[in-house]
Image (tube, helix red, strand yellow):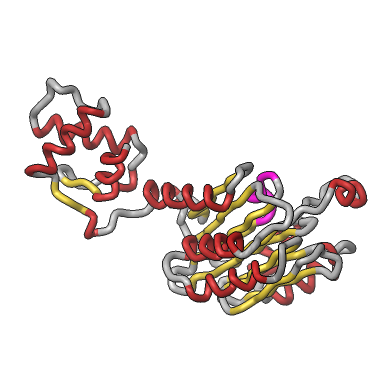
Amino acid sequence: MSVLLAFPFSLFKERGKMMTFSIVGFDPKTNELGVAVASKFLSVGAVVPFAKAGVGAIATQSWANLDYGSLGLDMLEKGYTPEQVITELTQNDERAAYRQVGIVDGKGQSKTFTGASCYDWAGGYAEENFAVQGNILVDHRTVEVMKTSFMQSEGSLAERLLAALQAGESAGGDSRGKQSAALLVVKENGSYGGFNDRYIDLRVDDHKEPVYELARLLKLHQLYFEATLAEDIIEIKGELETEIQNLLYENGFLDRGLTERDDLLDAVQSYHLIENFDERVQERGYIDQKVLDYMRIK
């Protein structure tokens, strides 16, 4: 994947080929839309993924034209189908033969496009609720296993997109190396505090194993930002109270001279705020199992 800015196209060509493989997806149960991408390119998350809640998700790559993302979302919002969007974008682009793009809309309609001059192996698949595509891949198996993974996997949209990316990596992935990866998922009021639709926006800009680092970041995102499950709420009492007290002592969150239960519960509250577990704060006297698990390994 490469970015076409104000430089001569020939200059980019001389610097070498950049590869990318990606998946765009829609979850009809949650209405989430997202993009997962990996590339031998610095900070691919700043270039390839575009998404808007209720509208669609777009991956623009292979000498990427960023207008494909912004203009494509505008057209989807106006009612264009993914196929119509690609037709409009490519017929007005003199370098369309070098572009690759995948689109899924808020209804699950999808389309992928690979220009005739994209570097081998290049291609993709579009099915209901997703599209996968890649260029300069080892071979076609990368996008094939990504397709199979997304269709067969379970879990949240983010987990399924990431699983597809990991499957593509394991099947061969890029033919030039690894550098960056990104995961973008949007949903209405999905951001921290509910202020916008940016539910998950994770980027690994430069790493030896970017896809697996992305998986680690997703687990952290789930820990810090997902709501507590009812079955994870446990009461602080008995042996558990003593254990939590000792954990707080050992990690400097509670003075050993403070032994009253209220002192302990105050320290539990402070621990949540200091460690950024804002979304997992429970009624006084209770704790989230996942926070407790974190305390035990920290």
Q: Residue at 18%, 22% (x, y): give it.
A: 255
> Relative to 156, is 245 on the left or the right?
left
Could you tell me residue 237's position as x and y percent?
A: 9, 44
Report the front residue among 114 and 177. Answer: 177
Quadrant in which the N terminus appears: bottom right
Position above or below: 259 against 107 = above
Report the front residue among 77 and 22. Answer: 22
> Relative to 153, is 111 on the left or the right?
right
Could you tell me residue 75's position as x and y percent?
A: 70, 68
Could you tell me residue 104's position as x and y percent?
A: 62, 70
Quadrant in which the C terminus appears: top left
Q: What range is drawn magenta here?
A: 42-48
Q: Is residue 241 visible?
A: yes
Q: Is residue 53 visible?
A: no
Image quadrant where residue 208 sits:
top right
Report the front residue among 13 and 267. Answer: 13
- Residue 44 located within the stretch drawn in magenta: yes
> Relative to 186, is 2 on the left or the right?
right
Image quadrant where residue 65 sits:
bottom right
Q: Residue at 65%, 67% (x, y): give it.
A: 142
- Residue 119 located within the stretch drawn in magenta: no
Position above or below: 25 against 186 = below
> Relative to 210, is 239 on the left or the right?
left
Position above or below: 94 against 287 = below
Report the front residue among 223 and 71. Answer: 223
Q: Residue at 49%, 53% (x, y): give it.
A: 215
Q: Residue at 22%, 31% (x, y): give it.
A: 248
